[in-house]
Amino acid sequence: MKIYAHRGSAGTLPENTIASFRATAILPVHGVEFDVHMTKDGELVVIHDESINRTSNGKGFIKDMTLAELKSYDFGEWFSTKFKGEKIPTLREVLYVFKDTHHHLNIELKSDVFPYEGMEDKVLEMLKEYRLERRVVISSFNHEMVSNFKMQAPQIETAILFMEVMIRPDDYANIVGADALHAFFPTAFRAMGKEAIASGRQFRVFTVNEEIYANMLQEIGVHAIFTDFPERMYQFLNRRV
Ligand code: G3P
Ligand code: MG
């Protein structure tokens, strides 16, 4: 079972920061996941929430701020004073960290609350520029955006994110144009988990931070987990095989 480092290594380092990505870039895990939003001036930035309230010393929605304004805030100190001075990274800065590594990149488009019109085009352009089209999977809880992305770039792997237990996930993925299924991990224990695995699509689950669940998921044949503790989980899973 493969491991994706979630938001960089969110359990031990400030999530979605360059400090976290640099540390993740030297880990032997299969991949890394991070979240993308769009600023008022149309720049793509890597952060989980719609606002900067939780993970910075500022306040407000990303959609209402320019990149220059966002760069004036601190995104490390909320986690630990050791990380004071961390700035919000742009997508470009994060891709640069991973441009020569082996990692599979899961770019999650966080367009489920605010629509971020034109986000797909900007992401696509950057992936072409960095020649990363074959080393990424584009996912979103906004399945309209997954569908649009697939229509524009059929060569790029896509995934639908979902929390619920679904009926016929394979048929739904076909309708959307998603290659893979990224699901909340308890869905794996239901009938749909079996169906998803049997469909031959990559079935990756989030967010798995406890070894006891990682073990159960590995036994039922889940292809990959997203975890906030990639280093610890890697040691655990590789000690057992
Ligand atoms: O992409 C997997 C996972 O990151 C989805 O949930 O809220 O952590 O972005 P969230
Ligand atoms: Mg995410």
Image (cartoon, grey):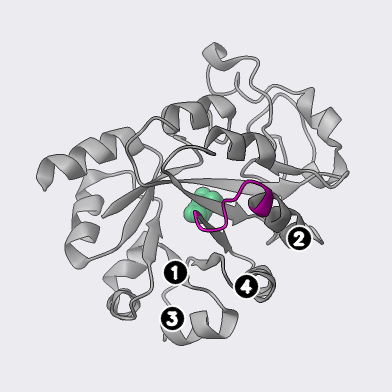
SS for tag 4? helix
Q: Residues within 10 Å of mark 1 (few under 14, many from 20)?
A: many
Q: Position of residue 161 (x, y in %)?
A: 52, 65
Answer whether labels 1 and 4 touch (C-beta < 8 Å): no
| Residue 13 in view | no
Dot 2 or dot 4, earlier in sequence? 2
- Can you identify the residue that label 4 sits on? 150
Q: Residue furthest left?
A: 240
- Can you identify the residue that label 2 sits on? 121
Query: Which residue type does callout 4 highlight?
Result: Lys
Q: Position of residue 179 (x, y in %)?
A: 48, 73
Query: Which quarter of the figure is the N terminus placed in?
Result: bottom left
Query: Which residue type does callout 3 highlight?
Result: Pro
- Can you identify the residue that label 1 sits on? 181
Answer whether labels 2 and 3 touch (C-beta < 8 Å): no
Query: Which residue type does callout 2 highlight?
Result: Asp
| Nearer to us: label 1 or label 4 | 4
- Can you identify the residue that label 3 sits on? 169
Q: CA distance from mark 1 to mark 4?
A: 14 Å
Label 4 near ligand 1 (CB < 8 Å)? no
